[in-house]
Amino acid sequence: MIKNILICGAGMMGKNIAFVFAGNPDYSVVLYDLYETDVPGGIRSNTKQLVEKEVMTEADVEERLGRISFTTDLDSDGIRNADFVIEAVFEDMKIKQETFAKLEERCRPDTIFCTNSSVMSPSEISAKLRHRERFVGTHFWNPAHLIPLVEVIKSDASSDETAQTVMDVLAGVGKKPVLCKKDVPGFIANRMQHALWREAIYIVEQGIADAKTVDDAVKYSFGLRLPQLAPLENSDMVGTQLTVNIHDYILKDLCDSHEASPLLREMLADGKLGFKSGEGFMKWTEEETKQSAADLNEYLIRMLYNK
């Protein structure tokens, strides 16, 4: 029975994942990090808009915080008694492997291990573990306390039972888990997302349209209907024959580069780093970058909670 949840890594993702699991009153959540961090303050800040939009009250947030404890002691009972572990440390293969090696020395043989990574192979991360069958990838999308999707990725050794247990646990805390049956780069959603990015960047690179126009073309057409009408349902709607006809005509003209765009590399060389430098494909003030993040959260809250 899953009761004791351990989250390793108390950055933004780790805090938000801990908040999600603390929504189940049957769970005790331990958040571990090498360094002291203000977990309550970070979670209150991350959930501020949920309170402002009356999705939950301050009392609701405090109740969840009451189920989250924090430790920097890897030998504490919270580590040793964990039933279910989610690692959310830096996207560095060595650090992830070392983290799980230390956890395996301390946790029970039946403890389920999950790695939160958007790109890194769970097969490679778990390669040196003894009990690889109880290890899967769990890709939470940022912001983790709002985006419903979590991709559960089977490694080359994950058992079906472990994958199903993780799916059930995630569904139980209000997430929408989907199963990635094969450990492939990008898993499911990022493969589709970056196929779109590649074509969008190519359109700008080739002078077909400027960056603002490309983004507007997405926002005010198929982007509006994607939450309701996803690609394969859309294909079924218009029919297989039309899909074949369109693809026979257009696919040969789409970008199929296997490397990052020359335009991206040129921007990188020119110091155009996006929000970080104030310019990427477009120019951004500090105020605009902050507003973009706030607008995203507000949009997600409106979509998910009608608030």
Image (tube, rainbow, N blue to C red):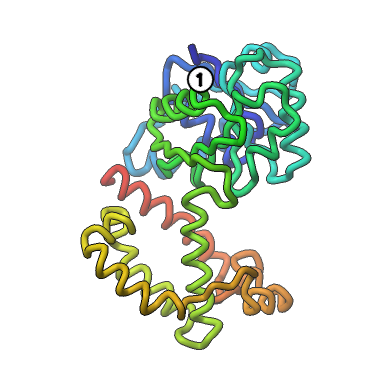
The residue closer to the viewer here, 1 or 17, is: 1
At x 40% / y 41%, what residue is drawn? 148
- Specify the quadrant of the image occupied by residue 266: bottom right
Indicate whether 11 appears above or below 261.
above
Residue 28 visible at all: yes
The residue closer to the viewer here, 237 or 19, is: 237
At x 36% / y 72%, what residue is drawn? 247
The residue closer to the viewer here, 104 or 32, is: 104
Q: Position of residue 254 (x, y in %)?
A: 47, 76
At x 37% / y 43%, what residue is drawn? 52
Q: Position of residue 107 (x, y in %)?
A: 68, 16
Residue 296 located left or right of residue 275:
left
At x 61% / y 71%, what residue is drawn? 278
The residue closer to the viewer here, 49 or 253, is: 253
Indicate whether 271 appears above or below 82.
below
Residue 47 visible at all: no
Q: Position of residue 121 (x, y in %)?
A: 64, 43
Q: Which residue is mark 1?
A: 66
For the residue marked with disc 1, what is the amino acid? Gly
Q: Position of residue 174 (x, y in %)?
A: 38, 31
